[in-house]
Amino acid sequence: MDSRSNQVALVVEDSAVQRAHMVALVQSLQFGTVLEARDGVDALRVLDNYGKNQVYLVLTDLDMPGMDGIELIRHLGEHQLAENVIVTSARDPRLLEVIENMGSSDGRLHLLGTMLKPVALEDLTAMLKRVDQIKHAGMVAPDHVSFTLQELETALEQNQFTPYFQPKVAIASGVVNGVETLARWQHPIHGVLAPFHFIPSIEGTLLMAPFTLAIIDQALRQLNTWRRLGHYAITVSINLSAETLADSDFIGRVDALVNSHGAAPESLIWEVTETMVMSHLSECLANLARLRLKGYGLAMDDYGIGYSSMQQLSRCPFTELKIDRAFVYGAAERPNRRAILASSIEVGHRLGITTVAEGVESLLDWNVLQELSCDVAQGYLIAKPMPADEFPNWIRENRLRLRSLAASGASKRLHRPERSRTVGWQ
């Protein structure tokens, strides 16, 4: 974790007792300077008096007299007074969901997350640790960096785009049964860059098809390498964009590429989002059916955040349902998230579809997934995305830990009645 001795934090809380508690938590994390304020108005005054560069972290309550946390967040974003924000509250958890959506829709505000009161040291530590992990995984680059189409084309020609792989684990057994392929750019100046730095510039251009084929080709090579090492049960999931999924010629090229590597279609799972399917509905539905007829697996990604997910599930031959991290992360503490998570898992089971929970980052959330009989988990609790050559060693080093995670809920499952399941289109 990065040293915090040079970082400044501000705690905003109208309750003197709660404020002292949170100041003590932040101080225990070795922040160099910890400021405090009673409400939003006082916070802006403190920041104005501090008069230096933006503070690293603002930890603010939501419900305060004077200026509440929502208004404070708006000011912090507009005037770029803080690098990161964490919101706390003892009110209805759904209010915190609103705040998280505010943060995700405003590029000026980096909302790390929200926490229910009383704030615990381990929760605060985990939230800050996740930011450090993302940074060291190549998820952060200077905001002003942008790339021309020519730069992206050169990067593709020089094989600078490479796949990273994030393991997927069977919750009941702890066995690694697959990986998701995630593109990275090995940039000669900026280092390893995550997809959000370059995918938006590639989508909708003539580079999308060759970029996707290059990632698929490398993923298939790794699949063959892992199988030679004895990892025969591993499946590889790969994302398809809207324009590639809607292109019947591209689907044929993908199938030919898979055959050239001698890979079984059953070892490949193509991931698509509901929004993607809706953007080219008839073409996407036809090509999804073609892919399924050839024996490939199909996953609906980011399930739960679209407006007609249930309708898409009913008419598309999906074999895997990937539940968005928005309903997984924090489900142990948020009844509303747990309710949607439970409903999604139940829908998948009734359709005979494998359920995959994304964004599993805490043991508490893993335990909830066990209780709800989710099939597969993926997230930082298991592993961050990694280069292909690290994967075999990671399996060896983590086999016992993953089995221990699975065993933690075994006794509960022994007393759970058998779940009835209907047969879906698989």
Image: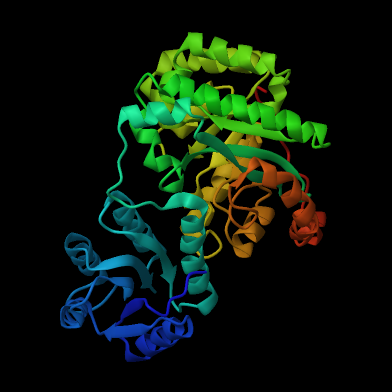
Q: Quadrant of the C terminus?
A: top right
Q: Residue at x 15, y 78 (%)?
A: 48
Is residue 375 in sight in this rendering? no
Which x, y percent locates residue 326? 46, 51
The x and y percentages for residue 67 are 18, 74
Nearer to the camera, 412 or 183: 183
The number of callouts visible is 0
Between 36 and 307, the residue placed more toward the observer is 36
Q: How is the image coloured?
A: rainbow
Q: Residue at x 75, y 45 (%)?
A: 392
User: At 30% across and 41% down in the image, what residue appears?
Assistant: 146
Relative to 205, 288 lies left or right: right
Q: Residue at x 79, y 51 (%)?
A: 396
**In this picture, residue 313 sits left or right of residue 425:** left
Give residue 124's position: percent from left, percent from top: 48, 73
Q: Taking the image as drawn, is residue 383 in sight?
A: yes
The x, y position of residue 79, in whole percent, is: 17, 64
